[in-house]
Amino acid sequence: MANQKIDITKSSGEKVRFSIDKLQKSLRLSGANETTVQEIVKSVQDELYPGISTREIHNRAFALLKKKKSVYASKYKLKKAIYELGPTGFPFERFLSGILHYSGYRTKVGEVLQGTCVSHEIDVLAIKNGTLNIIECKFHSEDGLNCNVKVPLYINSRYHDVKIPLEAKKDKDFEDTLGWVVTNTRFTVDALQYGKCMGLYLLSWDYPEGDGLKDRIDRLGLYPITVSTLLSNREKDFLLERDIVLCRQLLKDSFYLDHLGVSNGRKERILGEMKSLCVM
């Protein structure tokens, strides 16, 4: 099938033409060298068939990368690892707060603000350069679900309810406010159009172009612990329950691995993986 044009099936059910370029790009972002990238592309191409799912292609590429080097596989599975922060969405809010913290923001999670009409629990508050960013997250724990226009509509109304009391404060440590909508998937065209029209800051998996969630994570080396190929699901859940969301946090608080009863040899391998992922 290597030289034939093949239609593949996305998680949404949509049929699209298989793109070698997209596969190569995602493999290169894992850190794999060009020889490895081309070997995996050839193997995947040889196994294609009409209607194959993007998940099957991803799983096959992941398995081949893991054989080469586990850290490549960890970076390659980033999108899936974000879904694994669910299903409540709270670890995703912590994760976003961590990304912003390491980008120079002062952040708080789950603060309650009094609006003009009612009080609101805000997912993340982040201050930088005199602007208080009021951030609401829309987390999806499965692939194929995009963020539609109803989300920024709802979040915009919450933002404007808290904006007036905030800006009227006399002892405030900020000059301006800005409402954010953040999702781990993608925005629909209407959601983007409405959000931009209302002056909201929109952040998704791949938006803004070149500065979406994926770009920021790769650039800062801020991977969630769920990318690990060495930690079990039970161990990941244990760490998430204790607000250890970033690989960088586990490096700092490695004693949690002792709480899990991890052997010294395995602990060393896990921390080695964490260090490799944190290299920017």
Image (cartoon, grey):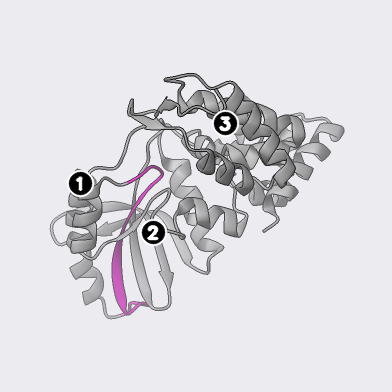
Residue 149's disc is: 1
Which of marks 2 and 3 precedes in the sequence? Answer: 2
On whether residue 56 falls in the magenta region, the answer is: no
Q: Tell whether 8 sits left or right of 134.
A: right
**Rendered residue at 53%/65% (across/down):** 103
Asked if the residues shown at circle 3 and circle 2 are in contact, with their CB atoms under 8 angstroms apart, the answer is no
Residues at marks 1 and 3, CA–CA distance in whole angstroms: 32 Å
Residue placed most toward the observer, 76 or 113 = 76
Residue 23 position by quadrant:
top right
Residues at marks 3 and 2, CA–CA distance in whole angstroms: 31 Å
Quadrant where the N terminus lies? top right
Residue 2 position by quadrant:
top right
On whether residue 185 falls in the magenta region, the answer is: yes
**Rendered residue at 56%/38% (across/down):** 240
Q: Secondary structure at mark 1?
A: loop
Q: Secondary structure at mark 2?
A: loop
Residue 208's disc is: 2
Decide: few, some or many residues near mark 1? Use Cα within 10 Å; few <14, some 14-19, many ≥20: some
Residue type at mark 3 is Asp
Q: Is residue 256 above or below residue 280?
A: above
Residues at marks 2 and 1, CA–CA distance in whole angstroms: 17 Å
Residue 280 position by quadrant:
bottom right
Q: Secondary structure at mark 3?
A: helix
Decide: few, some or many residues near mark 2? Use Cα within 10 Å; few <14, some 14-19, many ≥20: few
Q: Which residue is mark 3?
A: 237
Q: Magenta region: which residues? A: 171-186
